[in-house]
Image (cartoon, grey):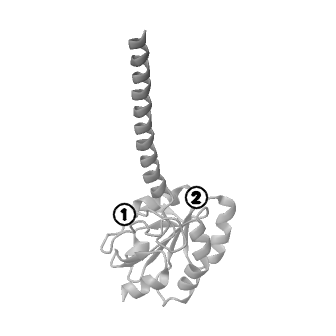
Amino acid sequence: MTGALWAAVTAALLISLASLALSALVTSRYRQLHARVTAGPGIPGYAGAAGPVFPAVGTPAPEFSTYAADGAPVGTDAVNQPGSIAVFMDTNCKACKDLLPEISGFLANRAAGPSPLAVISGEREQIGDYIAALPDSILVVGETAGDLARAFGVQAFPTVLLFDDGKVSASGARPAELMAAAR
């Protein structure tokens, strides 16, 4: 009986150690995935301040064809002109809400050029606030906005892309930093 008791205790100990090791692995993987999901746009004060990777300079604009919020067709030509800008935002993004005035001011005060492409995904009830803050923009909203963001390689919101000859010339979240990088 003593041998059977020792075997049972040893088996319980081994199962407990295996369970502990598995829990450590699951916790480690959870932290990795959680860090990816909560990564902010590289802005101090937001989760994941190291930030995700924005589309690289030199990345060509994808071929796309969709419709703007007003029903007008929108395609790759919207970003193939010199000085083209594309802004990607989501209504559920805290950084987007916080940076909306800065991005709006940047678009309003920029030199003359083609209308910026503003791609806004998220809650329909809140999209109106973004539309009002981004006048004179070609607006793409709703379900197609997410597909378009993925086509451009957007991994976080907000993302602002500056284009030159149909290729990304600067990318990031803060317009002032982009203009300095593009010079």
- Please say if 34 is above or below 99: above
Front one among 8 and 21: 8
Disc 1, SS: loop
SS at circle 2 = loop
Residue in view at x 55 percent, y 76 percent: 137
Instruction: Find residue 44 and report its horizontal and vertical position in percent.
Output: 51, 74
Mark 1 and 2 residues: CB-CB less than 8 Å, in contact?
Answer: no
Q: Does 120 sit left or right of 2 as displayed?
A: right
* 146 shown above or below 111: above
Disc 1: which residue: 63
Where is residue 111 shown, x and y percent of the image?
48, 90
Q: Residues within 10 Å of mark 1 (few under 14, many from 20)?
A: few
Determine the residue located farthest toward the top in the rendered image.
Answer: 1
Which comes before the other along the chain, label 1 or label 2?
1
Which residue is at a point 61% across and 80% down the rendered structure image?
101
Look at label 1 and name its amino acid: Glu
For the view shown, which residue lies furthest in the front direction?
Answer: 2
For mark 2, what is the residue? 142
Amino acid under disc 2: Gly
In the rendered image, the residue lying farthest to the right is 125
Q: Quadrant of the N terminus?
A: top left
Q: Judge by depth and name the residue closer to the eye, 13 or 37.
A: 13
